[in-house]
Amino acid sequence: MLLIMRINEDTLLEGGKVVLVPYNADHVPRYHQWMCSPELQKLTASEPLTLEQEYDMQRDWREDDDKCTFIILDKQKWADPSIPEQECMVGDVNIFLTDPSDPSLAELEIMIAVPCYRGKGLGKEVTRMMMCYGIHKLGIRKFEVKIGLDNKISIAMFKKFHFRELSVSEVFQEVTLGVTVNEALQKHVFGNMDFMLQREYGKARDSRQATFTPLSL
């Protein structure tokens, strides 16, 4: 099986509004702050963790063969090297391999954690970028998403990417949507893929840090 988490450990994806970078230990404190929110716990079906448990989770995700995680950064903020990367964080996006017998099937999960960034098209851009990455780098041919029944905005957004309803769970109050990748989807949704650049994360991070050297008083 493809080691999908490790394949992105030095990958940076740059779009128009966002930059996607691998989830590393430096991001954990801010991520932990987010996940203390009852709203986000409900949206992600997550239990509250201690900071130490969050570090353990991050390490587990780094070694997980079935999971690929990127942190979503505000590109405009990230372009200013005086702003620490952690302060540019706005959410995360994950691809999970959910069926051991079918590595071409993946579940997609997106969280815009910072409320003021919602409703500004970031989710749409991240979805497009992550699906493109999944198709071309991970060999994904079928995507599924699970969304709360009351989250009409997200349901409508995924339907713009040709997702269709597969099932509804009244128990969990969520709908499962899915899409199969074909030539028409790639042409109409992704076009010539000039909307996204891929770079080496380590070099980009080091260059950013070198650009901003605080004065010693």
Image (spheres, rainbow, N blue to C red):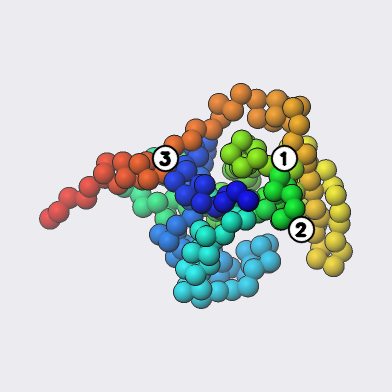
Q: Percent position (x, y) of residue 46?
A: 64, 68
Mark number, residue 189: none
Residue at the image position 80 percent from the left and 59 percent from the top: 174
Q: Amino acid at mark 2?
A: Gly
Q: Secondary structure at mark 3?
A: strand
**Image quadrant where residue 25 sits:** bottom left
Q: Amino acid at mark 3?
A: Glu
Residue at the image position 76 percent from the left and 58 percent from the top: 148
**Image quadrant where residue 123 sits:** top right
* Measured Cα–Cα span from mark 1 to mark 3: 25 Å
- In the rendered image, the vertical position of residue 186 relative to residue 130, given as above or below: above
Q: Which residue is mark 1?
A: 141
Residue at the image position 31 percent from the left and 41 percent from the top: 207
Q: Percent position (x, y) of residue 114?
A: 55, 55
In the rendered structure, which disc, 3 or 2, sits on the residue that comes first in sequence? Answer: 2
Q: Which residue is mark 3?
A: 200
Dot 3, how many residues are within 10 Å of its Cα: few (below 14), some (14-19), or many (20+)? some
Q: Percent position (x, y) of residue 149?
A: 80, 57
Horizontal relation, residue 89 to residue 119: left or right: left
